[in-house]
Every structure is written in C-alpha cells, then in structure tokens.
Amino acid sequence: MSHSVDEILSGMIELLRECGLDSKADWFLHRRDVLRDSLTESAQFSDAVRELDAATAGMGGFTDIPLTPRSDRITVQDARDKQWELAEGLGDAIEKLTSQ
C-alpha cells in the first residue's frame, strides 16, 4: 500500500474520532487494515480501494459527514477544511494507485 494512502486514512480516522464518530472511523480503519494486510493484486485489496473511492466523495461520502469536534483543539471550520483536504488527498492517491 502507498505510504500516502496509509497516512491519509490515518488522518481521516483521527479526525472522525476527534468528532466522536467512532463507527465511521472504524469503517475506514477496517479498510486501511485490509490494504495493509493484502497483496496489491488481491481481490480484497481491490475491493477496499473501490469502497474507499466510493466513500470519499459524493452523496453520503466522507465529505458529507457533519463534523463537530469534541474538544477545543480544533474548530469546526478547521475540521471541515481538514476533511476536504483529506478527501482530495485520498482521491488523488487512489487515482495514482489504480493507474499503476
């Protein structure tokens, strides 16, 4: 798995947990673990990439999740900005990964 995909997914998981969205964070964590533990040529790897790609943008995707941080470490606006940055980064990383 690409190092950047792993880093981006970790950032998404951390952001979701910061906002108290543990079940959504767990969904991304499971796919990150599949990518870490699978060969890039495997069906499991391909399925996880497709699922992540579909869940990143669009209706009901990562960018549609309303974020409200549970602490003062990050503002709502900072969380939204990070959300879009991570979604765009993951989309770019997936595109690179699938074009190899």
Image (spheres, grey):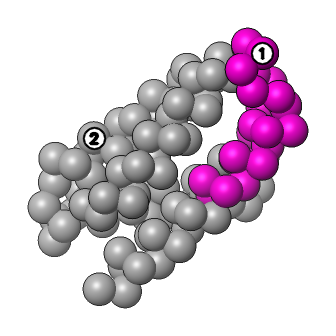
Q: Is residue 99 above or below residue 25?
A: below
Residue 27 magenta-drawn?
A: no
Q: Nearer the viewer, residue 8 or 33?
A: 8
How far across and down, in percent of the image, does residue 14 sit? 53, 30
- Residue 50 percent location from the top left of the image: 43, 64
In the image, is residue 85 part of the stretch drawn in magenta? yes
Mark 2 lies on a secondary structure that is helix
Residue 33 - label: 2
Segment tinted magenta in the rendering: 64-87
> At numbered mark 1, what does the secondary structure look like: helix, strand or loop?
loop
The residue that appears at 67% across and 56% down in the rendered structure is 85
Three-letter amino acid code of the residue under disc 1: Asp
Q: Which residue is mark 1?
A: 72
Quadrant location of the N terminus in the rendered image: bottom left
Specify which label sits upstream in the sequence, 2 or 1: 2
On the rendered image, what quadrant is the C terminus found in? bottom left
Closest to the observer, 42 or 85: 85
Residue in the picture at 37% in, 86% down: 99
Q: Is residue 24 visible?
A: yes
